[in-house]
Image (cartoon, rainbow, N blue to C red):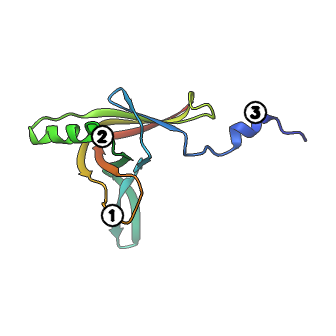
């Protein structure tokens, strides 16, 4: 039985290195995105006959964005600094795995109402030549997944 290239493309796992991120409608480059977890707390109901587990409230959504620090102004700092001014700046974020061309989304995670909760500066090491990477931790209200 011959296998068509389209069949292979549709059943082969998607590599994670081709992704695009949009924060509040603005495309940004990142080296790593993590924490796109959808989880629920569990409730254990115990009676005289045993115990039953049930789903409870949705767990907090904590997303981490990492990217190289550049000489220009940090958009991460501006966003988290707004909190100290008592401003709430929640933004929607989309993260899309793309096809081999990097143009067409294959799977998209839509994050709603994300706001920064922690900005981590790069680790400094005089004996290293690695790039400086800043890290922003976000909390969000909801995540939805769309397959294209």
> How far is mark 2 from mark 1, CA to CA?
18 Å
x then y, percent, for residue 23: 35, 33
Where, by quadrant of the figure, is residue 102 drawn?
Answer: top right
Q: Quadrant of the C terminus?
A: top right
Looking at the image, residue 113 lies above or below residue 116: above
Q: Position of residue 144 (x, y in %)?
A: 43, 37
Residue position for label 2 = 71
For residue 66, side relative to residue 91 (left or right) = right
Image quarter for residue 111? top left
Q: Could you tell which of marks 1 and 3 lies nearer the N-terminus? A: 3
Q: Is residue 96 above or below residue 52?
A: above
Which residue is at 33% across, 45% downward? 69
Ranked by sequence position, the earlier of labels 2 and 1 is 2
Residue 74 at least partly seen: yes
Q: Is residue 114 left or right of residue 4?
A: left
Q: Which residue is mark 1?
A: 125
Q: Residue lying furthest left in this view? A: 85
Element marked by disc 3? helix
Q: Is residue 58 visible?
A: no
Q: Position of residue 110 (x, y in %)?
A: 41, 35
Disc on res. 6:
3
**Image height check: is 26 above or below 143?**
above
Q: Are marks 1 and 3 in contact (CB under 8 Å)?
A: no
Looking at the image, is mark 1 or mark 3 nearer the viewer? Answer: 1
At label 3, counting other C-alpha atoms closer than 10 Å, the crowd grade (few under 14, some 14-19, many 20 or more) is few
């Amino acid at each position: 039985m011959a296998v068509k290239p389209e069949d292979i493309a549709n059943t082969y796992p998607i590599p994670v290195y081709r992704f695009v991120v949009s924060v509040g409608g603005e495309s940004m480059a990142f080296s790593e995105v993590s924490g796109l977890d959808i989880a629920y707390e569990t409730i254990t109901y115990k009676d005289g006959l045993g115990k039953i587990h049930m789903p409870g409230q949705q767990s907090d959504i904590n997303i981490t964005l990492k990217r190289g620090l550049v000489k220009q102004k940090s958009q991460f700092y501006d966003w988290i600094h707004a909190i100290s001014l008592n401003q709430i700046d929640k933004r929607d974020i989309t993260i899309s795995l793309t096809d081999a061309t990097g143009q067409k989304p294959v799977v998209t995670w839509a994050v709603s109402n994300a706001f920064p909760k922690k900005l981590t500066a790069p680790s400094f090491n005089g004996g290293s030549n690695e790039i400086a990477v800043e890290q922003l931790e976000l909390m969000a209200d909801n995540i939805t997944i769309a397959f294209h």
